[in-house]
Image (cartoon, rainbow, N blue to C red):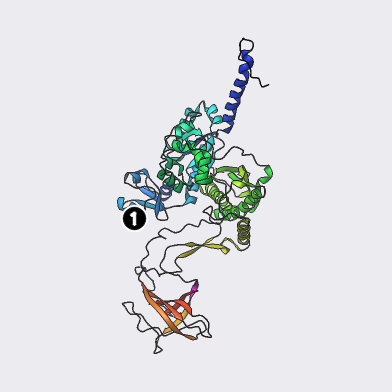
Amino acid sequence: MRTFPESPTSEHRQPQHRRPQRQQSQRRQSQRRQSSPPRLLVLWCPDWPVVAAAAESGISAAEPAAVLAANRVVACSAVARAAGIRRGMRRREAQARCPELAVFADDADRDARLFETVATATEELIVGVEVVRPGVVAVPVAGAARYFGGERTLLERLVDHVSARTGAECQVGVSEGLFAATLAAHRARPVPAGAAAEFLAPLGVQELDQPGSGRRDLVDLLRRLGIRTLGAFAQLAERDVLARFGADGVLAHRLASGRDERPPGRRRPAPDLAVTETCDPPLERVDAAAFLARTLASRFHAGLAARGLACTRLGIHATTEHGEELGRSWRCGEPLTPDGIADRVRWQFEGWLTRGRGDTPTSGVTVLRLEPEETVEGSALQLGLWAGGSGAEHTPEADKAARALVHVQGLIGPEGVCTAVFDGGRGPAEQVRLVPWGDRRTPADGHDAPWPQRLPSPSPATVFEAPCPAVVAGEDGRQLDVTDRHRLTAWPWTVAFGDGRSRRVQNWAGPWPVTARWWVPGDRGRCVRLQVVLESGSGSQPVAVLLRWQEQGNPKWTVEGVYD
């Protein structure tokens, strides 16, 4: 027979009934404390890409300035914002609103190099500094707050110290988790302990689209669905978010709820996961360090991948010939790829070797060590290798190919393995630029401009590095020329190139004039392009080639490319 406990009727029975309830309450509070994110202090330098670019070029902070990537504004100064400049605005529109706008190209290496002074100043006051990205550093606040007598005292002293040492404007914030602490730094306020969810709830859902997060499409979708605030997004059930938005949506939902970026379960890796390299001769130049970083990053990533792990916080440590110890921690919101590891090592060396301060190393680096200070399970990785996480599939074959390419670079030099980047230009050779494997594949400014007189599609499948001489003749056998009005003196009849044998022209199109660069001294003058289809003979398929005529040249006609 099933029985139920009787209600307490005496004082000696009452404590025995309430003790399990108190224990359960204490257990729940302990579980909440264990699952809550650590309390972090974030120091943020507003508009850091603009601040770094202006400092390097000597531009005054009172002048409007903006940093552009792919012909769009990615950062702008407060003076430029007052003139109506906004992130995402096209260059032409920004300059129309503010003609005196100073424009700089996006340069992550420059931002990281100059930000090293801010990270060093922060580290002089608080230990355990982690560089999240150039412009943002994070540090656990509990120990430092106890040492300085409270969080507010720590924040005031840190702002004064960094401003005095570097001259940079900065704001600080404190909250549970990196996401909430960063937003608190944007508003220059400490969030009370345990109030991260209440602090985030009224903020707009666009706060999820932080630099480098890639959540712009998710934010647009949430807005179209009528979800305007982080609190409204946090109220949704996590399983419904997973079914509708996938794994990226669940991560954003955790951030909006005031929880950590990932579920608990991170662990300190074993010491043998660190990778150490002895440098002989010592590293004294940034380019030599960057070359070594690619090989070392591949080894480091492969060692973690073999154990099913990926790194989310990277420790970079170096020892110089004179025994100086250098070190820095880099935090990343997503697991680091080999390219990401190599970039951070290069950035750190630029800060160490070129910052021009009194604490610059007095000798070359002889020992370089990469240490995974925080890892996650590799099964959570959903990043692509080939394009740095832009959607390419992350497969063992891709890892193997990348290691092979890095090995080839180690044998023949970094310029021996290159990948193509589409740039702006009118001719086929101008539209592709080769960059060494592992370097940032960023298109040049203006690559998406209209480019008048651009050669119509399709482009040649094969473009010669050195154009092949050709002879283009009319029906009378005389070589064709081009008039001042960019017209041919006769119809093309035969073309001879390569083996010298003349081939009959079956069809042709053009000419297309190129009148650009007429103002450049020493330029070779006017040129036109001509597409022709040639008889190949012997029953094979016709051959289509792209011809180029140059006003000042010998020979005047050359073969620029061949179509498939």
Question: Quick one: quadrant of the N terminus?
Answer: top right
In the rendered image, residue 408, in percent from the top left (x then y), is placed at 62, 62
Q: What is the magenta range?
A: 444-468
Instruction: From the image, give the main secondary structure of the stretch colored magenta.
Output: loop
In the rendered image, residue 368, in percent from the top left (x then y), is placed at 62, 48
**Residue 546 falls within the magenta-colored stretch:** no
The furthest residue to the bottom: 476
Relative horizontal placement of residue 72, taking residue 336 as reference (left or right): left
Asked if residue 473 can be seen in this view, the reply is yes
Residue at (33%, 77%) from the top-left corner? 486
Q: Please count the marks in the image.
A: 1
Crowding near pointer 1: few (<14 within 10 Å), some, many (20+)?
few
**Nearest the camera: 365 or 258?**
258
Relative horizontal placement of residue 417, taking residue 198 as reference (left or right): right
In the rendered image, residue 41, in percent from the top left (x then y), is placed at 50, 34
Q: Is residue 22 above or below residue 420?
A: above
Asked if residue 171 can be seen in this view, the reply is no
Report the amino acid beneath label 1. Answer: Arg
Residue 414, image quadrant? bottom right
Q: Secondary structure at mark 1?
A: helix
Query: Label 1 belongs to which residue?
Result: 92
Residue at (61%, 39%) from the top-left corner? 266
